[in-house]
Amino acid sequence: MKPSKSNESASSSLQEDISDTTEEGNKELCPGFREVDDFVKYGLGAVLSATKASSVLPQAGDEYDFYRSFPGFQEFCESQGDKLLHCMSQIMQHHGCRSYIRDRNKLTGVEERFDLIVDSNDFILERAGILLDEADGVNRNQKPVIPAGFQPAKIVVSSWNRKGSGSGSRSETFRMLNAKNVARPQLKFKERVDNSNTPFVPKIFIKPNSLKPLPSYFSNKQMRKERPEDLDVPAALADFIHQQRTQEHVEDMFAHPYQYELDHFTIPESLLSKPEPQMYKPMSETKLTFIDSLEDLVALNEKLCSLSEFAVDLEHHSYRSFLGLTCLMQISTRDEDFIIDTLELRGEMYILNESFTDPSIVKVFHGADSDIEWLQRDFGLYVVNLFDTHQASRALNLARHSLDHLLKHFCSVDSDKRYQLADWRIRPLSNDMVQYARTDTHYLLYIYDCVRAQLLDFNHEQPGLLQCVWNKSKDISLKKYVKPIYTEESYLELQRKQKKSLNTQQLTAFRLLYAWRDKLARQEDESIGYVLPTHMMIKISEELPKEPQGIIACCNPVPPLVRQQVNELHLLVQQAREMPLLKTEIAAQKKKGLTLIKKPEVTLFGPHDTSRVSEGELPHSTPGEGAVKQGILFSEDVHIMDVDEQKTSGLLAPPKITLFQEPETPHDQKSASVSQMKAKRIIDSFENPFRMYLPSSDVHVNKNAKFDPSSKIFEISKRWKLQSIEQQENELEAKRKSKEEAKRRAKKVAEERAKAKQSYQESLKNVATVRQQAAEFAKDGGKKRERADSEVGEKTPKPSKKLMKSEKSQKTEVPKEDFKPFDYNQSDLKVFDGAKPKSNTQFDPNQQTHDFKKKKMSQGQKNNSAGNRSMSYLTGKSERGFRHNWPKR
């Protein structure tokens, strides 16, 4: 209810303001407001109060669902929603937009309303912009009259392209100076530009100031050009093919030629001491020399070799060339400035290596990271003893580290940025361009003196900070130029930088467009930004136009090569649209290499452990999935793989020396060298520490060491054999002893039995038989035998009952009782009849009832056992009226 209260308060305040100002209606801008500021202030207050009220409303989720369950809240939300929609419809209708926002389908109503609101907002904002422009005096509807063929200059406004923004005056912008209809300088080069997809090979073939001679690969450069078999391929590719054939100096091809000299270079003590800054001469009093001939270049090199320091800077062009072109080189000494036309002297610039690689001459650069690579790429020039003022500026923690800031800070000179991105291919150069190029190096030596002095003052006259700047500058001079190489995964890095979420079709289109752009840029020697800018390529990939006109619509302005190749681009987009639409994560997983076909069952698996996994069960990958495909080195699309490379799967590289693997026995033992035999003995001497836990099979025993009496394995195998033989002998001896003991016991028992039998027979000799006793009894007249009286004291009294109970457990002899025959009259013969005796007549609930069939079967079996009864009739009780206790389901 809070939002309604706030709205009522706002409406009441608005009515009060209107009532108070009705008297001055003629002076008011609109009813209730005198000026625009009052209306804007009131409007902002109303928006702020509405925003605060909306924040108190129940949030979407469980809280809103809870409040939604109350009918009062639900009715309130519906009524307020209808009011809001009605108000929005009136606003849209007032501006001429579609206002049917209330009556919509329940399923698609939200999306349709959202689209209507977005369109209305765009229309209203555009109309507001037009009205604001008209208020400023600019009418965009009236187009100026321009003569046919006239193209107005394009104003490029950026943060680097403003001047006087802090002085209070209107900021001045500069237009980029670009050249039209300029002859391509690449056509004049003696050595053709190599845009092939091959690694960069240094161009140097003469190495002045060398401590380590140049490898023969570079010194025979002129001879390599005369090879007839490689005339149809680029120079760098011919070098690479030749080196792969001969396998000579492969490492020297891509090494830094002055690596050894730079590693052994030491900074002189004079350069670590505090200098006295030498003031620069005014530019009007300094001589300027423009060098565009070989004679002037040689004279300049001789002059530079006699100096102790000079400043260098380059002007580069990269828009109309794939790799880029170094168009100008500026060199300044303490007394003179030089500008070299490097486009004219591109093939002779190597002459300056004599002065550039002299360790006794300091070469001062500013931001030499790119300059070092450009010198190597275009001219084969290398720098020894480099000092970078950019690194010195960072060590001093200055506000900015650009050259114009250093000029302003040390020389009080305002640099002009109008020609920073100019097309330096223009010939002849204008005076302004010459002045701009000259400024970059004219003051650089003075800045070099000033920053060295400040570095020492900043570190309390200690050379540690200055030494750090020298070391960083040396690291920059050690940089090597690397040519951009295209691979099938090159587009992924650019796609990650854009941070765009693309589906499989869009990603396929991006990949195909990236490959097309790279291929066309190399062929036409144009930059990838000129062929197809990245933002246009992303736009085409996201939209996936169905028609060629859609591709043209995605590019503004349309690049010339895109307009020429629009049909080919349309085919690439169609190919991308035919891809199945999947999630990006699944597509990324399919792109990943090294996918194992099956995993080993053993959790603790190692490449050298062959005790548990056979050689055929080792994990492997298919060449199409597992092996990572290398970048295409040749210009053709077909990449021919060797037979061994096709068999290679995954990254299971064979080790050089294994501890437990059995080496293959060579076929020819006599042809092995001494070192090979020694290595073989060392490998054979290895012993598996887990041998005792492994099964004794020939797989784990070295065949050569098994029969060598001097090896450890032979001793272990023999010891195992001896132990097994000894164990078998012990078992046989134990069996033999057990048999002898059994025979001895049996013999002893037989002897005891024979003795007992003999003694028994001897005892029967003096005993009368029954017949003899009966005959004696008849002779005596049938008198009963009397018991002989025992001796006096031998008659024992009859024991008492208590005494009998106490001695019952201790009795050893049981008195013999008279034999009494069993009286069968007392027995219950009904047991044999099959009837169960009634032991207890009472009902027992715990007693389990048996199945009727089982009971009947058991009775049948018992009746069959009876001898005299009939087998066809089973006697027993009647089951009539018997209640079965079936088990519950």
Image: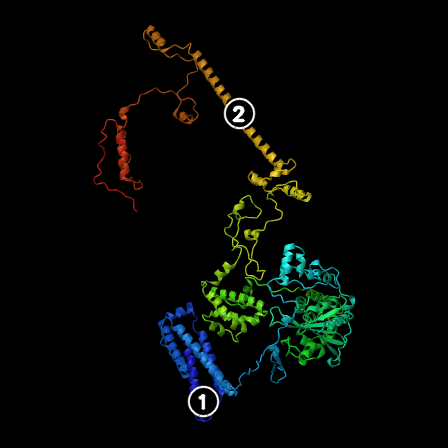
- Answer whether residue 244 is visible to the viewer in this image: yes
The location of residue 556, given as percent across then percent down, is 52, 75
Q: Which residue is mark 2?
A: 736
Do the CB atoms of the residues marked 1 and 2 lie less than 8 Å apart? no
- The residue depicted at 46 percent of the width and 77 percent of the height is 51
In the rendered image, residue 191, in percent from the top left (x then y), is placed at 65, 67
Q: Nearer the viewer, residue 547 or 260?
A: 547
Residue occupying the point 45% across, 79% down: 121
Q: Residue 304 or 475: which is nearer the viewer? A: 304
Q: Is residue 369 left or right of residue 60?
A: right
Question: Toward which corner of the image does residue 667 lie, by quadrant?
Answer: top right
Circle 1 packing at 10 Å, graded few (<14), some (14-19), many (20+), is: few
Q: In the displayed structure, would residue 511 be above or below residue 742?
A: below
**The residue tagged with tag 2: helix, strand or loop?**
helix
Q: Position of residue 342 (x, y in %)?
A: 68, 72
The one nearer the camera, 194 or 60, is 194
Q: Quadrant of the N terminus?
A: bottom left
User: Hey, which residue is sitting farthest top in the picture?
Assistant: 779
Query: For the residue carrying disc 2, how many other residues have a C-alpha within 10 Å: few (<14), some (14-19), or many (20+)?
Result: few
Q: Is residue 200 above or below residue 697?
A: below
Upstream in sequence: badge 1 or badge 2: 1
Q: Compute the Cα span from label 1 to label 2.
A: 129 Å
The correct choice, above or below, for 773 with respect to 609 in the image is above
Measuring from the top left, give residue 886's x and y in whole percent. 28, 43
Q: Quadrant of residue 87?
A: bottom left
The numbered disc on residue 634 is none
Q: Which residue is mark 1?
A: 30
**Amino acid at dot 2:** Arg
Task: Name the image colouring.
Answer: rainbow
Residue 41 at least partly seen: no
| Disc 1, SS | loop
